[in-house]
Amino acid sequence: MSIQGRIASEGEPPESVTSAARRGFTLVELLITLTMSGLVIGSMVTFFVTHTTGSRLASTRVEAVQRARFASEMLRRETSLAGAGIPDAQPLVVFAGPDDFVFSADLASSTPGDRVAVYQLPGASPEATEGADSASVVLPAGDLYPGYWYGPGATTGPAETIRFSFEALAGGGYALTRTVNSLAADTLLRGLERIEGRDFFSYKVMESDGTMRELAGDFVWHEAPVHESQADTAGSALTDSIKLVEIAFKVRVRGRRPDETVERAFAMGVALKNAGLVRNAACGDPPTLGVTPNAEVTALDPLSVTVTWTEAVDEASGEQDVQQYTLYRKELDEDLPWPIASLPPNPSLTFYSYIDTAVEPGATYVYLLGATDCTPAQSELGESPTVTVPNV
């Protein structure tokens, strides 16, 4: 064999290799390959599903916690603003109970350039940004707040009545709601529960010596419509002493597994920074008199004029804050009246009377009457018909 022939023979593959290449994979080899591929793909799908489920549960858990944090922050922020921008006569705390806290604050205004309200809400309705007649606000105890308009001249005041409530749900748990004036309540958060041994709301009041104590009892509310009026005593005045509101609740969220739940507790103490601030007017609006005095000559020896009047509107009703009646007299041609008598209110009297003996024969007089509260502020004066003293 020549050298070329030998080289060619040595370069050819063995017959067994050539046969195997032509034959391909066996059935067993294919089955093994498919099985391994299935195991790998199955593991990848299982990992993907587990990861997706875990991510979804984690996202739901984080979202639930974030909602709870948002609601608790709103509750904390707005509670701390209780009393902001309220008129002198309007109480800061209206109702304080274990599930409800109702307070007054000028939180929102739709008036451009309003520098008193906390928030500017252009286009918002007056029902959401102005005070309401207090009699339209239904308190948690079912009572209607005594009717009173806190704006000047018996008009709408700027401060709204805000109510936060933890309301029981039919299926269990509680929902946190927020109500402005007498509008429908907005639900901020559901699925809440009490923390064992604690109320949703609890309160601390400041004693005269500066110490703090827990407020006992189911609830207190400001029964008197006017802050620091004569009717603002006992339990009504107790709301004015609340300095700290403690808020506590918990929310259940999903755990790492679908059948697992985790509790998240939220607890905070909110100081009422506007509580106890000095107010310029302590007795609300000036008293409403609503009566006209009558004057007539009743005796000739000594010569005298008797002036009579019935109780003022604000003595037995309204603000109930009349502390003094002042009677004035002037001659018909005089510009300024002179005070001649002061009388305290007396609920046992059906009418008041004063005998004026310092009159001159032949003079014509007009008597004027005013009611004064504890501010002190005086009502508009009621004027009697003229009375002429005879010449004797």
Image: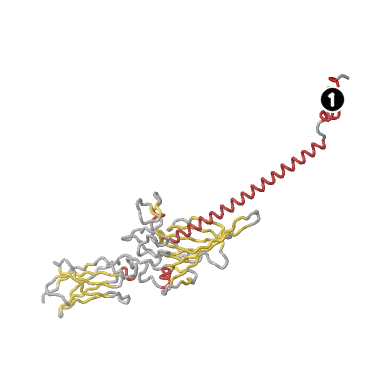
Residue at the limit of the structure toward the front, as seen here: 3
Q: In which quadrant of the rendered view does residue 12 lie? A: top right
- Tell me if residue 69 can be seen: yes
Number of residues whose C-alpha sits closer than 10 Å to that of mark 1, classed few (under 14), some (14–19) or many (20 or more): few
214 horizontally vs 260: left or right? left
In the foreground, 261 or 287: 261
Where residue 375 sits, quadrant-wise, is bottom left
| Residue drawn at the location 36% of the way across and 69% of the way down | 228
* Percent x, y of residue 308: 24, 73
Count of numbered labels shown in the rendering: 1
Q: Secondary structure at mark 1?
A: helix
The C terminus lies in quadrant: bottom left
Residue 170 visible in image: no
**Extreme bottom residue here?**
301
Horizontal placement of 43 versus 121: left or right?
right
Give the residue number, with chain letter if any, for mark 1.
Answer: 10
* Image location of residue 316, percent across then percent down: 34, 71
Q: Residue 21 versus residue 95: which sits nearer the camera?
A: 21
Q: How is colour applied across the structure in the image?
A: secondary structure
Name the one closer to the observer, 306 or 154: 154
Q: Quadrant of the N terminus?
A: top right
Instruction: In the rendered view, tell whether residue 41 sits above or below residue 236.
Output: above
Amino acid at pointer 1: Glu
Vertical placement of 310 versus 104: above or below?
below
Q: State the image coordinates of residue 362 (x, y, percent, origin top left).
A: 11, 73
Q: How far from the left and from the top, in percent, is residue 255?
A: 63, 55
